[in-house]
Amino acid sequence: MKKIGLISDTHSYLDPHVFQYFEPVDEIWHAGDIGDLSVADQLAAFKPLKAVYGNIDDQLARRQFPLDLRFDCEGLDVWITHIGGYPGRYNQRVREIMQVNPPGLFICGHSHILKVMPDKQFGCLHINPGAAGNHGFHHMKTIVRFQVEAGKIGQLEVIELGKRGAIG
């Protein structure tokens, strides 16, 4: 069993509450728009970090992190990218890959809209953890926590960090 902390769209701001909520996790996954790489450095110093770059990330971030991460976690095929869409409204690049090789769990960020929903067409779960930073139109900063065991997702929690713009 592996416990995961999922975050996205920090835009150079790391809410200090993240450390409290991610204390029990084994890994942190960041779905892009990291911003200043000090955010990734702080997360990686705290727990093992997997991350992708997003559209606001600079060349340094793009050299350190990939556009897509596809890997096995406890028997679950996971795909993380930043811009992807959601079930029934994937962007063309994601839709083409889904048609050939759908994952068990598809994670993206970008929209700043929290979504956890099954994709019945491709037989996977879609998660967008919303946005954890202070930049954007979202009202509430959110992260997600869950566990993966024997290829299944369980104990999924949405955590509200506070209103956008509220510091720690």
Image: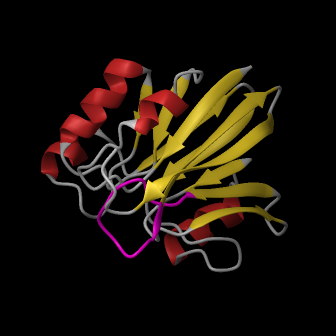
Percent x, y of residue 45? 32, 19
Q: Is residue 42 magenta?
A: no
**Place of residue 79 in the rendered image (x, y in percent of width and height, measured from the top left):** 58, 47
Q: In which quarter of the image is residue 100?
A: bottom right
Could you tell me which quadrant the N terminus lies in?
Answer: top right
Q: In this view, does 58 lie above or below 56?
A: above
Q: 129 or 67: nearer the eye?
A: 129
Which image quarter: residue 126? Answer: bottom right
- Residue 79 is left or right of residue 57, and the answer is right
Look at the image and name its color scheme: secondary structure
Provide residue 39's location: percent of width, then percent of height: 26, 38
Horizontal relation, residue 52 to residue 128: left or right: left
How far across and how far down the image is residue 35, in percent?
23, 51
Q: Locate the C terminus and report the quarter of the image it occupies.
A: top left
- What is the magenta range? 129-140
Task: Tell me: residue 149, above or below residue 130.
Answer: above
Report the front residue among 118 and 130. 130
- Total numbered labels placed on residues in the image: 0
The residue drawn where x is 74% and y is 31% is 148
Magenta stretch: dominant SS?
loop
Tell me: 80 left or right of 45: right
Q: Which residue is found at the position 32% from the left and 56% from the top?
A: 33
Q: In this view, does 108 lie to the left or right of 100?
A: left
